[in-house]
Amino acid sequence: MPTSEAKQLVCSWKRCQRPAADENGRCILHSRNPQKDIDAFGAVLQNALQGHYLSLSGVVFPKGFKVPEFPPCEPNLSEAVFFESVSFRGLHFRGQAAFLGTEFHHDVDFSFCSFEQGAVFNSAEFRANALFLKSTFSKGVFFLATHFYQDSQFKECSFCDSVTFEYAHFVREADFSGAEFRASVNLSRTEFLDGANFSDARFHDTVAFEVTDFSGDHVFEYKNAVALRVLFEGSVTFFRTRFDGEARFVANDFGNGVDFSYARFGDAAFFTYQKSLAPVR
Ligand SMILES: [Zn+2]
């Protein structure tokens, strides 16, 4: 039966056509075997790195493998697994970057990156630190139901289009200090279990925090200069938001009003020097 035998030799991962190489019928890229041959893996990966559309969907990066520089392209790393730390620092993503369900078992660095066509990190798992320092997202970015288990830093990021963290789960503090949100931000149903820091952040459009859970300390605070105040140009809602830790709202500018209806404060809440030209509820 040459036909059926040939079929069995093809990788069992989705529509991968590479030859099966492990006991589970997966090719060298998709094999989860921790002992897989790093040199053979690297050779096959080099081939995959060619072309404008880079499909590394489901690829399992073995421990000890040095992830190479990605070429400027439209990378699809959905469901990929990184067992080692990985750096995308300074990369320029010209096409939409897809990281749906990607597992990062070690630190990952997306600092100083620019995402020209946006990025999708839905259901991705950051099991170690996730760094997004000073990155620019020119189009929409999605962190829907993304899990951050260690520190996550979005310091001084520029979000030029809409961004959603709906159902995202932050086990450690999320740092958005100095970040600029030019379009709408959806932080509804986001869980910040160790608090979130939005010091010096700028919100130019609508911010939704509906049913958001801030279990740790939550800081909307400016440091020591008037220019560094948090500016909300769009409407802000903290409707049914829960603040279990201390909540400090210092010198914020709610240009279009703010809604704290049914918000719950489990600890001390400070509201000092707020400014709003629109109704505050
Ligand atoms: Zn495969």
Image (cartoon, rainbow, N blue to C red):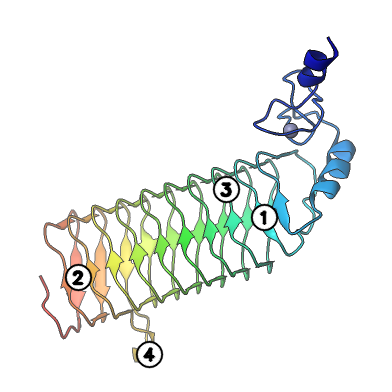
Which of the numbered marks, if any, corresponds to residue 75? 1
Which residue position is annotated with label 2?
A: 270
**Residues tagged 1 and 2 counted as in contact (Cβ below 8 A):** no
Is 239 situated left or right of 197 in this image?
left
Indicate which label's residue lies in the foreground, 1 or 3: 1
The x, y position of residue 200, in whole percent, is 39, 78
Tag 4 or tag 1, which sits nearer the N-term? 1
Mark 3 neighbour class, 10 Å CA radius: few under 14, some 14 to 19, many 20 or more: some
Q: Earlier in the sequence, mark 1 or mark 3?
A: 1
Q: Earlier in the sequence, mark 2 or mark 3?
A: 3
Distance in Å between CA atoms under marks 1 and 4: 38 Å
Q: Earlier in the sequence, mark 4 or mark 2?
A: 4
Residue drawn at (63%, 51%), measured in percent from left and top?
Answer: 107
Residue under label 3, please give it: 128
Which of the image's four quarters has the N terminus? top right
In what quadrant does ligand 1 lie?
Answer: top right
Q: Would you say 217 lies left or right of 173 here?
A: left
| Mark 1 touches mark 3? (CB < 8 Å) | no
Where in the figure is residue 135, as x and y percent of width and height?
A: 57, 70
Q: Nearer the viewer, residue 134 or 160?
A: 160
Q: Which is closer to the viewer, label 4 or label 2?
A: 4
- What distance separates the C-alpha of mark 3 from that of mark 4? 34 Å
